[in-house]
């Protein structure tokens, strides 16, 4: 796992990437949040989609909802960047749409777009 910290618009944002799956269950999400808060002090996280287990994107598993709830409980805003074009599930598309119109969790195409969404101060 690679964590880098970037300041954008006066806000600390942690960027997470890696070669292995990091978000595979609720405990791994909590571990990530605690690690980032401890190492960087940031409460906004940009996550490369490639480090997230595919089960997250199958809404019937409940994993996405559980992880998002933990992030919200720990006052963490996050943006996942990557290619979502291969997903055809209407519930997932609706979930992404609703998330992108909220204030806590975003699904975007690029890392830079993720940074820009999280750097907004008007949450």
Image (cartoon, rainbow, N blue to C red):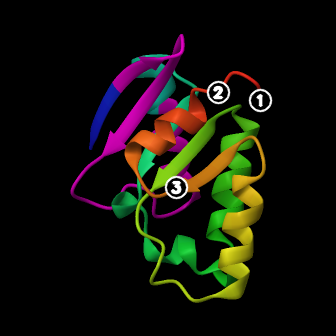
Q: Is residue 2 above or below residue 10?
A: below
Could you tell me residue 86's position as x and y percent? 45, 84
* Alpha-carbon span between mark 1 and mark 2: 7 Å
Distance of label 1 from label 3 (alpha carbons): 17 Å
Q: Are marks 1 and 3 in contact (CB under 8 Å)?
A: no
Look at the numbered disc 2 and give the secondary structure of its residue: loop
- Labels in figure, total: 3
In the rendered image, residue 102 lying in the magenta stretch gets the answer no
Residue 59 position by quadrant:
bottom right
Give the image quarter of residue 118: top right
**Viewer-side residue, 88 vs 65:** 88
Is the Cβ of the residue at disc 3 closer than 8 Å to that at disc 2?
no
Residue 22 colored in magenta in the image: yes
User: Where does label 3 land, which residue?
Assistant: 108
List the residue tagged with mark 2.
Answer: 120
Looking at the picture, tell me which residue is in the foreground, 5 or 93.
93
- Residue at 36% across, 41% down: 16
Q: Residue at x 64, y 65 (%)?
A: 64
Measure the C-alpha gap from mark 3 to mark 2. Answer: 15 Å
- In the image, taking residue 83 as reference, residue 60 lies left or right, namely right
Looking at the rendered structure, the secondary structure element under dot 3 is: strand
Which residue sits at x=54%, y=52%?
27
How would you rate the neighbour count of disc 1 (Cα within 10 Å): few for under 14, some for 14-19, many for 20 or more? Answer: few
Asked if the residue under mark 2 is in contact with the one under mark 1, i.e. CB atoms within 8 Å, the reply is: yes
Residue range in magenta is 5-34
Instruction: Indicate the position of residue 42 as horizontal and vertical percent values.
Output: 52, 22
Residue to which mark 1 is pinned: 123
Left/right placement of residue 119 relative to residue 21 reads: right
- Identify the residue shown where x is 51% and y is 77%: 55
35 on left or right of 123:
left
The crowding category of the residue bearing disc 2, from other C-alpha atoms within 10 Å (few below 14, some 14 to 19, many at least 20), is few
């Amino acid at each position: 796992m690679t964590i880098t910290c970037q300041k954008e618009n006066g806000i600390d944002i942690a960027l997470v990437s890696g070669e292995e799956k990091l978000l595979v269950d609720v405990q791994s999400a909590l571990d990530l949040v605690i690690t980032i808060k401890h190492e960087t002090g940031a409460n906004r996280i940009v996550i490369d989609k490639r480090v997230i287990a595919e089960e997250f994107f199958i809404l019937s598993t409940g994993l996405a909802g559980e992880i998002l709830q933990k992030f919200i409980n720990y006052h963490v805003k996050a943006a996942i960047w990557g290619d979502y074009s291969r997903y055809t599930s209407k519930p997932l598309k609706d979930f992404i749409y609703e998330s992108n119109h909220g204030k806590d969790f975003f699904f975007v195409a690029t890392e830079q777009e993720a940074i820009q969404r999280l750097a907004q101060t008007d949450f």
